[in-house]
Image (tube, helix red, strand yellow):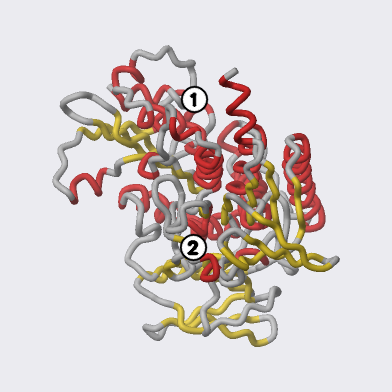
Amino acid sequence: MGSRRVASSVVSTRFVIIGGGPAGNTAATYAARLGAQVTLIERDVIGGAAHLWDCIPSKTMIATGGAMSFTRRIQGMGLEHQDAEVDNVALQDRIEDIQGRLQSNTIRLLESQGVRMIMGSARFIGPNLIEVATADGAEQIEADAVLVASGSRPRIPDWCHPDGERILTTRDCYPPKVFPTSMTVVGSGVTGVEFVHMFSSFGASVSLVVSRQQVLPSKDPEVAAVLEDDFLRRGVRLLKGARAVSIERNGDEVTVSCDDGRVVRSSHAVLAIGSVPNTDHLRLELAGVHTDNGYVNINRHCQSNVAHIYAAGDVSGKLPLSSVASMQGRKVAEHVMGLHKVVHRHLDYDKAASAIFTEPEIADVGLAEADAFAVGRKIRVTKVPFSSNPKALINNDASGFVKIVSDPATGVVLGGSIVGRHAAELISVIALAVTANLTVSDIVESLLVHPALSESLAEAAE
Protein backbone atom coordinates (compact mmCIF):
# COMPACT_ATOMS: atom_id res chain seq x y z
CA MET A 1 0.00 0.00 0.00
CA GLY A 2 2.82 2.41 0.92
CA SER A 3 4.66 1.69 -2.31
CA ARG A 4 1.56 2.48 -4.36
CA ARG A 5 1.20 5.87 -2.66
CA VAL A 6 4.82 6.77 -3.45
CA ALA A 7 4.37 5.80 -7.11
CA SER A 8 1.22 7.89 -7.32
CA SER A 9 2.94 10.99 -5.94
CA VAL A 10 6.02 10.88 -8.15
CA VAL A 11 4.34 10.14 -11.48
CA SER A 12 3.06 13.71 -11.72
CA THR A 13 6.54 15.27 -11.41
CA ARG A 14 7.24 17.20 -14.59
CA PHE A 15 11.01 17.16 -15.03
CA VAL A 16 12.52 19.22 -17.86
CA ILE A 17 16.17 18.73 -18.77
CA ILE A 18 18.09 21.19 -20.93
CA GLY A 19 20.99 19.37 -22.55
CA GLY A 20 21.33 15.76 -23.67
CA GLY A 21 24.95 15.10 -22.69
CA PRO A 22 26.14 12.67 -20.01
CA ALA A 23 24.50 14.67 -17.19
CA GLY A 24 21.22 15.23 -19.00
CA ASN A 25 20.64 11.77 -20.45
CA THR A 26 21.63 10.03 -17.20
CA ALA A 27 19.26 12.24 -15.20
CA ALA A 28 16.52 11.60 -17.74
CA THR A 29 16.94 7.84 -17.62
CA TYR A 30 16.99 7.57 -13.83
CA ALA A 31 14.16 10.03 -13.24
CA ALA A 32 11.96 8.26 -15.80
CA ARG A 33 12.60 4.93 -14.11
CA LEU A 34 11.46 6.50 -10.85
CA GLY A 35 8.21 7.67 -12.41
CA ALA A 36 8.85 11.25 -13.54
CA GLN A 37 7.42 12.72 -16.73
CA VAL A 38 10.69 13.65 -18.40
CA THR A 39 11.24 16.04 -21.30
CA LEU A 40 14.77 16.27 -22.65
CA ILE A 41 15.68 19.28 -24.82
CA GLU A 42 18.84 19.23 -26.95
CA ARG A 43 19.87 21.72 -29.65
CA ASP A 44 22.89 19.89 -31.09
CA VAL A 45 23.26 16.15 -30.59
CA ILE A 46 21.71 13.64 -28.19
CA GLY A 47 24.64 12.27 -26.22
CA GLY A 48 26.27 15.65 -25.77
CA ALA A 49 28.36 17.83 -28.06
CA ALA A 50 31.35 17.86 -25.70
CA HIS A 51 31.15 14.09 -25.35
CA LEU A 52 30.49 13.07 -28.96
CA TRP A 53 32.33 15.94 -30.70
CA ASP A 54 35.30 16.24 -28.34
CA CYS A 55 35.93 13.33 -26.00
CA ILE A 56 35.08 10.34 -28.18
CA PRO A 57 36.76 11.58 -31.42
CA SER A 58 39.91 12.67 -29.59
CA LYS A 59 40.28 9.33 -27.82
CA THR A 60 39.62 7.51 -31.10
CA MET A 61 42.40 9.45 -32.81
CA ILE A 62 44.70 8.91 -29.83
CA ALA A 63 44.06 5.15 -30.10
CA THR A 64 44.95 5.25 -33.79
CA GLY A 65 48.05 7.33 -33.07
CA GLY A 66 48.98 4.89 -30.31
CA ALA A 67 48.77 2.02 -32.78
CA MET A 68 51.14 3.91 -35.08
CA SER A 69 53.54 4.49 -32.19
CA PHE A 70 53.40 0.80 -31.38
CA THR A 71 54.47 -0.13 -34.91
CA ARG A 72 57.58 1.98 -34.38
CA ARG A 73 58.70 0.01 -31.34
CA ILE A 74 57.82 -3.55 -32.37
CA GLN A 75 61.44 -4.30 -33.21
CA GLY A 76 62.00 -4.63 -29.48
CA MET A 77 59.48 -7.47 -29.46
CA GLY A 78 61.22 -9.58 -32.09
CA LEU A 79 59.28 -8.24 -35.07
CA GLU A 80 60.33 -6.41 -38.18
CA HIS A 81 59.56 -2.70 -38.13
CA GLN A 82 56.74 -1.59 -40.44
CA ASP A 83 55.78 2.00 -41.20
CA ALA A 84 52.08 2.83 -41.01
CA GLU A 85 50.44 5.71 -42.87
CA VAL A 86 47.29 7.64 -41.99
CA ASP A 87 44.22 7.03 -44.13
CA ASN A 88 42.34 10.24 -43.39
CA VAL A 89 39.07 9.06 -44.95
CA ALA A 90 39.12 5.74 -43.11
CA LEU A 91 39.93 7.51 -39.85
CA GLN A 92 37.02 9.92 -40.34
CA ASP A 93 34.71 7.01 -41.10
CA ARG A 94 35.84 5.20 -37.96
CA ILE A 95 35.20 8.25 -35.79
CA GLU A 96 31.74 8.79 -37.26
CA ASP A 97 30.88 5.11 -36.85
CA ILE A 98 31.76 5.15 -33.16
CA GLN A 99 29.88 8.43 -32.63
CA GLY A 100 26.83 7.03 -34.41
CA ARG A 101 26.79 3.83 -32.37
CA LEU A 102 27.05 5.65 -29.07
CA GLN A 103 24.38 8.19 -30.01
CA SER A 104 22.00 5.45 -31.19
CA ASN A 105 22.49 3.54 -27.95
CA THR A 106 21.71 6.65 -25.91
CA ILE A 107 18.57 7.44 -27.92
CA ARG A 108 17.30 3.87 -27.67
CA LEU A 109 17.78 3.88 -23.89
CA LEU A 110 15.91 7.18 -23.51
CA GLU A 111 13.08 5.97 -25.74
CA SER A 112 12.80 2.74 -23.76
CA GLN A 113 12.22 4.77 -20.59
CA GLY A 114 9.50 6.93 -22.18
CA VAL A 115 11.56 10.12 -22.23
CA ARG A 116 10.22 12.78 -24.57
CA MET A 117 13.04 14.26 -26.65
CA ILE A 118 12.80 17.64 -28.36
CA MET A 119 15.46 18.96 -30.74
CA GLY A 120 15.55 22.69 -30.24
CA SER A 121 16.95 25.62 -28.29
CA ALA A 122 15.55 26.22 -24.79
CA ARG A 123 15.26 29.34 -22.69
CA PHE A 124 13.50 30.30 -19.47
CA ILE A 125 10.40 32.45 -19.50
CA GLY A 126 9.94 32.09 -15.76
CA PRO A 127 11.04 29.80 -12.90
CA ASN A 128 8.66 27.01 -14.01
CA LEU A 129 8.22 27.76 -17.70
CA ILE A 130 10.55 26.83 -20.55
CA GLU A 131 10.21 27.92 -24.17
CA VAL A 132 11.70 25.73 -26.88
CA ALA A 133 12.40 27.00 -30.38
CA THR A 134 12.32 24.12 -32.86
CA ALA A 135 12.39 23.81 -36.63
CA ASP A 136 8.58 23.70 -36.55
CA GLY A 137 8.06 26.72 -34.30
CA ALA A 138 7.98 27.40 -30.57
CA GLU A 139 6.59 25.40 -27.66
CA GLN A 140 6.18 26.25 -23.99
CA ILE A 141 6.68 23.55 -21.34
CA GLU A 142 5.75 23.77 -17.68
CA ALA A 143 8.09 22.13 -15.19
CA ASP A 144 8.10 21.15 -11.53
CA ALA A 145 11.88 20.68 -11.69
CA VAL A 146 14.48 21.73 -14.25
CA LEU A 147 18.02 20.53 -14.84
CA VAL A 148 20.39 22.84 -16.72
CA ALA A 149 23.00 20.62 -18.37
CA SER A 150 23.74 22.61 -21.51
CA GLY A 151 27.48 21.89 -21.56
CA SER A 152 30.30 24.10 -22.78
CA ARG A 153 32.19 25.14 -25.90
CA PRO A 154 35.86 25.91 -26.62
CA ARG A 155 37.07 29.25 -25.31
CA ILE A 156 38.24 31.55 -28.10
CA PRO A 157 40.11 34.75 -27.11
CA ASP A 158 39.72 38.02 -28.99
CA TRP A 159 43.20 37.73 -30.51
CA CYS A 160 42.44 34.51 -32.36
CA HIS A 161 40.10 33.86 -35.29
CA PRO A 162 39.86 30.11 -36.06
CA ASP A 163 39.13 29.25 -39.68
CA GLY A 164 38.58 25.50 -39.23
CA GLU A 165 41.38 24.69 -41.69
CA ARG A 166 44.72 25.88 -40.32
CA ILE A 167 43.76 27.74 -37.15
CA LEU A 168 41.73 25.23 -35.21
CA THR A 169 39.62 24.88 -32.12
CA THR A 170 39.51 21.50 -30.44
CA ARG A 171 36.38 20.59 -32.43
CA ASP A 172 38.12 21.10 -35.79
CA CYS A 173 40.70 18.38 -35.20
CA TYR A 174 38.88 15.07 -35.60
CA PRO A 175 40.59 14.85 -38.03
CA PRO A 176 41.64 18.19 -39.58
CA LYS A 177 40.65 18.84 -43.19
CA VAL A 178 44.35 18.90 -44.08
CA PHE A 179 46.54 16.68 -41.93
CA PRO A 180 49.30 18.75 -40.27
CA THR A 181 52.96 18.32 -41.07
CA SER A 182 53.67 20.60 -38.12
CA MET A 183 51.45 21.77 -35.30
CA THR A 184 51.61 24.42 -32.59
CA VAL A 185 49.47 23.62 -29.57
CA VAL A 186 48.46 26.57 -27.40
CA GLY A 187 47.61 25.40 -23.89
CA SER A 188 49.40 22.83 -21.74
CA GLY A 189 46.50 21.51 -19.69
CA VAL A 190 44.90 18.10 -20.14
CA THR A 191 43.48 18.78 -23.61
CA GLY A 192 46.64 20.46 -24.84
CA VAL A 193 49.00 17.64 -23.90
CA GLU A 194 46.64 15.09 -25.45
CA PHE A 195 46.85 17.02 -28.72
CA VAL A 196 50.64 17.05 -28.49
CA HIS A 197 50.66 13.28 -28.06
CA MET A 198 48.06 12.75 -30.78
CA PHE A 199 49.72 14.74 -33.56
CA SER A 200 53.28 13.72 -32.70
CA SER A 201 52.12 10.08 -32.89
CA PHE A 202 50.90 10.79 -36.41
CA GLY A 203 54.35 12.09 -37.31
CA ALA A 204 53.81 15.85 -37.11
CA SER A 205 56.48 18.17 -35.73
CA VAL A 206 54.86 19.67 -32.63
CA SER A 207 55.51 22.78 -30.54
CA LEU A 208 53.73 23.39 -27.23
CA VAL A 209 53.21 26.85 -25.77
CA VAL A 210 53.39 26.44 -21.98
CA SER A 211 52.34 29.51 -19.99
CA ARG A 212 53.80 28.09 -16.75
CA GLN A 213 57.11 26.37 -16.02
CA GLN A 214 55.72 22.85 -16.35
CA VAL A 215 53.12 21.13 -18.47
CA LEU A 216 49.97 20.09 -16.57
CA PRO A 217 50.43 22.81 -13.94
CA SER A 218 47.66 21.40 -11.74
CA LYS A 219 49.19 17.92 -11.60
CA ASP A 220 51.90 16.26 -9.49
CA PRO A 221 55.27 17.70 -10.65
CA GLU A 222 56.76 14.19 -10.75
CA VAL A 223 53.97 13.10 -13.09
CA ALA A 224 54.41 16.17 -15.28
CA ALA A 225 58.16 15.56 -15.47
CA VAL A 226 57.65 12.07 -16.93
CA LEU A 227 55.40 13.48 -19.64
CA GLU A 228 57.83 16.30 -20.43
CA ASP A 229 60.65 13.77 -20.84
CA ASP A 230 58.52 11.77 -23.26
CA PHE A 231 57.70 14.90 -25.25
CA LEU A 232 61.38 15.81 -25.51
CA ARG A 233 62.23 12.29 -26.71
CA ARG A 234 59.60 12.73 -29.42
CA GLY A 235 61.22 15.98 -30.51
CA VAL A 236 58.44 18.22 -29.17
CA ARG A 237 59.52 21.83 -28.71
CA LEU A 238 58.44 23.22 -25.33
CA LEU A 239 58.09 27.01 -25.03
CA LYS A 240 57.87 27.38 -21.25
CA GLY A 241 56.84 30.61 -19.59
CA ALA A 242 55.29 31.83 -22.84
CA ARG A 243 51.76 33.08 -23.35
CA ALA A 244 50.31 33.28 -26.87
CA VAL A 245 49.04 36.74 -27.83
CA SER A 246 48.22 36.26 -31.52
CA ILE A 247 47.72 33.57 -34.14
CA GLU A 248 47.90 34.60 -37.80
CA ARG A 249 47.61 32.64 -41.03
CA ASN A 250 49.52 33.43 -44.19
CA GLY A 251 48.65 30.91 -46.88
CA ASP A 252 49.64 27.46 -45.66
CA GLU A 253 51.65 28.79 -42.72
CA VAL A 254 50.39 29.76 -39.26
CA THR A 255 52.38 32.03 -36.96
CA VAL A 256 51.90 32.01 -33.18
CA SER A 257 53.41 35.01 -31.38
CA CYS A 258 54.09 34.97 -27.64
CA ASP A 259 54.25 37.74 -25.07
CA ASP A 260 58.00 37.23 -24.55
CA GLY A 261 58.78 37.80 -28.22
CA ARG A 262 59.13 34.18 -29.25
CA VAL A 263 57.45 33.15 -32.50
CA VAL A 264 56.48 29.68 -33.74
CA ARG A 265 55.64 28.86 -37.36
CA SER A 266 53.83 25.70 -38.37
CA SER A 267 51.31 24.34 -40.84
CA HIS A 268 48.56 24.36 -38.18
CA ALA A 269 47.79 25.71 -34.73
CA VAL A 270 45.17 24.52 -32.26
CA LEU A 271 43.69 26.39 -29.30
CA ALA A 272 43.34 24.31 -26.14
CA ILE A 273 42.86 26.97 -23.49
CA GLY A 274 39.70 25.81 -21.78
CA SER A 275 36.00 26.21 -22.33
CA VAL A 276 33.08 28.49 -21.52
CA PRO A 277 29.64 27.40 -20.29
CA ASN A 278 26.66 27.36 -22.65
CA THR A 279 24.32 29.43 -20.51
CA ASP A 280 24.32 32.80 -22.28
CA HIS A 281 21.24 31.90 -24.35
CA LEU A 282 19.14 30.42 -21.52
CA ARG A 283 17.93 33.68 -19.89
CA LEU A 284 18.53 32.20 -16.44
CA GLU A 285 17.94 35.63 -14.92
CA LEU A 286 14.23 35.32 -15.75
CA ALA A 287 14.14 32.26 -13.50
CA GLY A 288 16.06 34.05 -10.75
CA VAL A 289 19.09 31.76 -11.07
CA HIS A 290 22.44 33.21 -10.00
CA THR A 291 25.53 32.63 -12.16
CA ASP A 292 29.23 33.35 -11.88
CA ASN A 293 30.91 34.01 -15.25
CA GLY A 294 28.19 31.90 -16.82
CA TYR A 295 28.53 28.98 -14.41
CA VAL A 296 25.55 28.10 -12.21
CA ASN A 297 26.35 28.08 -8.52
CA ILE A 298 25.19 24.79 -6.97
CA ASN A 299 25.01 23.14 -3.55
CA ARG A 300 25.82 19.52 -2.72
CA HIS A 301 22.50 18.42 -4.25
CA CYS A 302 23.37 20.27 -7.50
CA GLN A 303 20.61 22.81 -6.72
CA SER A 304 20.97 26.42 -7.77
CA ASN A 305 19.75 29.24 -5.54
CA VAL A 306 16.29 28.42 -6.93
CA ALA A 307 15.51 25.13 -5.20
CA HIS A 308 13.77 23.34 -8.08
CA ILE A 309 16.36 24.37 -10.70
CA TYR A 310 19.50 22.22 -10.82
CA ALA A 311 22.74 22.33 -12.79
CA ALA A 312 25.11 19.52 -13.74
CA GLY A 313 27.99 18.86 -16.08
CA ASP A 314 30.28 21.61 -17.35
CA VAL A 315 27.85 24.44 -16.50
CA SER A 316 28.06 23.55 -12.80
CA GLY A 317 31.67 24.71 -12.62
CA LYS A 318 32.80 21.45 -11.03
CA LEU A 319 35.17 18.92 -12.58
CA PRO A 320 34.60 18.93 -16.37
CA LEU A 321 34.56 15.14 -16.67
CA SER A 322 31.90 12.99 -18.33
CA SER A 323 32.01 10.59 -15.39
CA VAL A 324 31.33 13.41 -12.94
CA ALA A 325 28.53 14.79 -15.13
CA SER A 326 26.84 11.39 -15.29
CA MET A 327 26.99 10.96 -11.53
CA GLN A 328 25.66 14.47 -11.01
CA GLY A 329 22.77 13.62 -13.33
CA ARG A 330 21.97 10.52 -11.30
CA LYS A 331 22.11 12.44 -8.01
CA VAL A 332 19.84 15.15 -9.43
CA ALA A 333 17.27 12.54 -10.50
CA GLU A 334 17.35 11.00 -7.04
CA HIS A 335 16.90 14.38 -5.39
CA VAL A 336 14.07 15.44 -7.71
CA MET A 337 12.26 12.21 -6.91
CA GLY A 338 12.83 12.46 -3.16
CA LEU A 339 15.33 9.65 -2.67
CA HIS A 340 17.69 11.95 -0.77
CA LYS A 341 15.30 11.67 2.15
CA VAL A 342 16.39 8.06 2.66
CA VAL A 343 19.88 6.56 2.38
CA HIS A 344 21.85 8.90 0.12
CA ARG A 345 25.56 9.32 -0.55
CA HIS A 346 26.63 12.80 -1.59
CA LEU A 347 28.95 13.19 -4.54
CA ASP A 348 32.52 13.83 -3.36
CA TYR A 349 34.39 15.65 -6.11
CA ASP A 350 37.71 15.15 -4.30
CA LYS A 351 37.41 11.41 -4.94
CA ALA A 352 36.82 11.58 -8.69
CA ALA A 353 39.34 9.69 -10.81
CA SER A 354 40.67 11.34 -13.96
CA ALA A 355 42.95 10.30 -16.79
CA ILE A 356 45.04 11.88 -19.52
CA PHE A 357 45.36 9.78 -22.65
CA THR A 358 48.92 10.57 -23.57
CA GLU A 359 51.73 8.06 -23.96
CA PRO A 360 52.42 7.16 -21.24
CA GLU A 361 48.88 7.47 -19.88
CA ILE A 362 48.42 9.46 -16.68
CA ALA A 363 45.71 8.87 -14.11
CA ASP A 364 45.11 10.05 -10.57
CA VAL A 365 42.51 10.11 -7.82
CA GLY A 366 42.07 11.58 -4.37
CA LEU A 367 44.69 13.42 -2.35
CA ALA A 368 47.86 14.39 -4.21
CA GLU A 369 51.25 14.24 -2.53
CA ALA A 370 52.04 17.91 -3.24
CA ASP A 371 48.65 19.07 -1.91
CA ALA A 372 49.14 17.12 1.32
CA PHE A 373 52.56 18.66 1.90
CA ALA A 374 51.18 22.12 1.12
CA VAL A 375 48.75 21.91 4.05
CA GLY A 376 51.16 20.08 6.35
CA ARG A 377 49.23 16.83 6.41
CA LYS A 378 51.13 13.70 7.39
CA ILE A 379 50.97 11.03 4.73
CA ARG A 380 52.72 7.84 3.68
CA VAL A 381 53.82 7.76 0.06
CA THR A 382 54.92 4.55 -1.64
CA LYS A 383 56.05 4.28 -5.24
CA VAL A 384 56.85 1.32 -7.50
CA PRO A 385 58.24 1.64 -11.05
CA PHE A 386 56.78 -0.49 -13.83
CA SER A 387 60.36 -1.46 -14.72
CA SER A 388 60.07 -4.12 -12.00
CA ASN A 389 56.78 -5.49 -13.38
CA PRO A 390 56.99 -8.68 -15.52
CA LYS A 391 53.97 -7.79 -17.70
CA ALA A 392 55.42 -4.35 -18.44
CA LEU A 393 58.63 -5.99 -19.64
CA ILE A 394 56.63 -8.46 -21.75
CA ASN A 395 54.80 -5.49 -23.32
CA ASN A 396 58.15 -3.83 -24.07
CA ASP A 397 56.88 -0.71 -22.32
CA ALA A 398 58.14 -0.41 -18.75
CA SER A 399 57.95 3.37 -18.41
CA GLY A 400 56.09 4.97 -15.54
CA PHE A 401 55.16 4.10 -11.99
CA VAL A 402 52.43 3.58 -9.42
CA LYS A 403 52.24 5.91 -6.43
CA ILE A 404 49.87 5.44 -3.49
CA VAL A 405 49.17 8.01 -0.79
CA SER A 406 47.82 6.68 2.50
CA ASP A 407 47.25 7.67 6.12
CA PRO A 408 50.30 6.55 8.14
CA ALA A 409 48.21 5.89 11.26
CA THR A 410 45.27 3.96 9.81
CA GLY A 411 46.54 2.76 6.44
CA VAL A 412 43.45 4.18 4.71
CA VAL A 413 44.14 4.92 1.03
CA LEU A 414 43.84 8.66 0.43
CA GLY A 415 44.88 8.89 -3.21
CA GLY A 416 47.24 7.77 -5.91
CA SER A 417 48.81 8.43 -9.28
CA ILE A 418 49.69 6.08 -12.11
CA VAL A 419 51.88 6.86 -15.09
CA GLY A 420 52.18 4.17 -17.74
CA ARG A 421 50.33 1.83 -20.07
CA HIS A 422 46.66 1.31 -19.14
CA ALA A 423 46.85 3.82 -16.28
CA ALA A 424 43.24 4.88 -16.97
CA GLU A 425 42.09 1.31 -16.28
CA LEU A 426 44.39 0.59 -13.35
CA ILE A 427 43.41 3.75 -11.43
CA SER A 428 39.97 2.20 -10.87
CA VAL A 429 41.40 -0.01 -8.13
CA ILE A 430 42.77 2.97 -6.22
CA ALA A 431 39.60 4.97 -6.89
CA LEU A 432 37.50 2.19 -5.34
CA ALA A 433 39.82 2.09 -2.34
CA VAL A 434 39.56 5.87 -1.88
CA THR A 435 35.78 5.90 -2.20
CA ALA A 436 35.23 2.90 0.10
CA ASN A 437 37.86 3.96 2.69
CA LEU A 438 39.82 0.77 2.13
CA THR A 439 43.32 0.35 3.55
CA VAL A 440 46.59 -0.49 1.86
CA SER A 441 46.31 -3.92 3.49
CA ASP A 442 43.06 -4.52 1.59
CA ILE A 443 44.96 -4.04 -1.67
CA VAL A 444 48.01 -6.03 -0.58
CA GLU A 445 45.92 -9.01 0.50
CA SER A 446 43.93 -9.14 -2.74
CA LEU A 447 44.90 -12.13 -4.89
CA LEU A 448 45.67 -10.46 -8.20
CA VAL A 449 46.48 -11.94 -11.60
CA HIS A 450 50.06 -12.81 -12.55
CA PRO A 451 51.60 -11.61 -14.76
CA ALA A 452 49.65 -8.34 -14.84
CA LEU A 453 50.33 -4.63 -14.53
CA SER A 454 47.95 -4.57 -11.54
CA GLU A 455 50.57 -6.41 -9.47
CA SER A 456 52.38 -3.08 -9.17
CA LEU A 457 49.37 -1.75 -7.26
CA ALA A 458 49.82 -4.38 -4.57
CA GLU A 459 53.55 -3.72 -4.46
CA ALA A 460 52.99 0.02 -4.06
CA ALA A 461 50.55 -0.67 -1.22
CA GLU A 462 53.13 -2.71 0.76
Quadrant of the frame with the N terminus: top right
Q: Is residue 319 above or below residue 260?
A: above
Picture residue at 40% right of the left edge, 53% below the top: 229
Categorize mark 2 by other alpha carbons within 10 Å: few (<14), some (14-19), many (20+): many
Residue 236 numbered tag: 2
Picture residue at 51% right of the left edge, 52% below the top: 308
Say if residue 127 shows up in the picture.
yes
Displayed quadrant of residue 284: bottom right
Q: What amino acid is found at the position of numbered circle 2 in the picture?
A: Val
Q: Which residue is the site of mark 1?
A: 391
Residue at disc 1, secondary structure: helix
Displayed quadrant of residue 27: top right
Residue at disc 2, secondary structure: loop
Q: Is residue 137 above or below residue 198?
A: below
Q: Are marks 1 and 2 in contact (CB under 8 Å)?
A: no
The CA distance from mark 1 to mark 2 is: 29 Å
Residue 125 vs residue 364, the one in the foreground: 125
Picture residue at 52% right of the left edge, 84% below the top: 159
Name the side, left or right, on which 239 lies relative to 185. left
Q: How many marks?
A: 2
Residue 294 placed where, x, y %?
A: 49, 68
Residue 133 vs residue 364, the one in the foreground: 133
Displayed quadrant of residue 286: bottom right
Residue 241 placed where, x, y %?
A: 34, 72
Q: Is residue 259 above or below residue 288?
A: below
Residue 333 vs residue 143, the one in the foreground: 143
